[in-house]
Image (cartoon, rainbow, N blue to C red):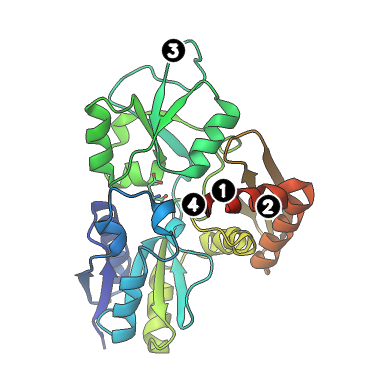
Amino acid sequence: MSRLIKIGTRGSKLALWQAYHVEQLLQKSGLATEIVIIDTKGDQILDVSISKIGSKGVFTQELEDQLLDGRIDIAVHSAKDMQSNLPDGFEIIAFTEREIENDVIASHKKGITLSDSSQPLVLGTSSTRRVATLKHFYPHVKTVEVRGNLQTRIRKMEDGLCDALLLAYAGVHRMGYDEMIVEKLSLEEFTPAVGQGSVAIEASSTLDPKVKELIISACNHRETEIKLRAERGYLRVLEGGCSIPVFALADNQGDTVTLKGGIVSLDGKERISVSVSGSADQPEALGEKLAEEVFARGGKKILDQIKTTLNK
Ligand SMILES: NCc1[nH]cc(CCC(=O)O)c1CC(=O)O
């Protein structure tokens, strides 16, 4: 038997790449698939910063409506774009194998590097985590907000808005722009956003359990799932959408998971980064432990300051 699996996705090139990636995994397991493209508010409001629209679910809600209607069986997203608490009745059923999780500098110019403070450098980014991290480690670097999909951002850079872009390797790679990468940034300084580099599959809890099992066994990468559950456990305590400069990266060796993460103030002056380890059986608990440690070392104060500033 083969029931057709309807894969919902946004229409951007990155989203489509991710949907095709999931489609391939499903097809390899002998499942029949169909891709359904859905327009979201996040795609339409391209000239307003995400932190101003209110990031909660801006890219996910329209897809969730279609999940409820049964027009699609699963919704595919960058795991990084998924809020830590999904609305009732929805769950992430699988995470695909994570790829390189680093941030990178991409440019059409050669010879650009963060560490050379003798040259003026303007970087395009719209992530508060990246801006604050730059202010902390590389205060000589200027930043300019660049929104839109990757193609749009590259065009703006080539038009002279900035010298280079600060992006996730995963997105650059998926779009086929590897040759523009001039520097791969360290995981210690540019610890990635929670979930960076993995693709998440969301479903409604009403999805037929047999179909759900088939999708999980075709797409879920167990090691990645453990890492992302730990990272998302941390994010959940901080109630952070993508507009708050928090970061976390898990690594697992056998039964032990190490989770490194923290928070950086918007002005870059304070940055707290802590590492904890624990059992792979309870990744969410490890995320909570990290949050406790980060809060105890001043992270709570930083978080409260950030929330006050962003809500103004
Ligand atoms: N913030 C938008 C976004 N969401 C997912 C990716 C890339 C893919 C990924 O990180 O998994 C990007 C672009 C970027 O941050 O450079």
- State left or right for residue 239 relative to residue 5: right
Instruction: Answer yes or no: disc 2 within 8 Å of ligand 1.
Output: no
Instruction: Choose top left, top right, bottom left or bottom right for residue 104.
Output: top left
What amino acid is labelled 3 in the image? Answer: Gln
Q: Amino acid at mark 2?
A: Thr
Q: State whether label 3 is within 8 Å of ligand 1.
A: no
Determine the residue positioned at 60% across, 31% down.
136
Q: Amino acid at mark 4?
A: Ser
Q: Which mark is in front, 4 or 2? A: 4
Q: CA distance from mark 4 to mark 2?
A: 25 Å
Question: Which residue position is annotated with label 4?
Answer: 243
Can residue 167 be seen in this snapshot?
yes
Q: For the residue labelled by badge 2, is the local secondary structure a helix, a strand or a loop?
A: strand
Q: Residues within 10 Å of mark 2 (few under 14, many from 20)?
A: many
Residue 217's x, y, as percent? 43, 74
Q: Is residue 176 visible?
A: no
| Upstream in sequence: badge 2 or badge 3 | 3
* Separation of marks 1 and 3 at Cα, in angstroms: 31 Å
Residue assigned mark 2: 258
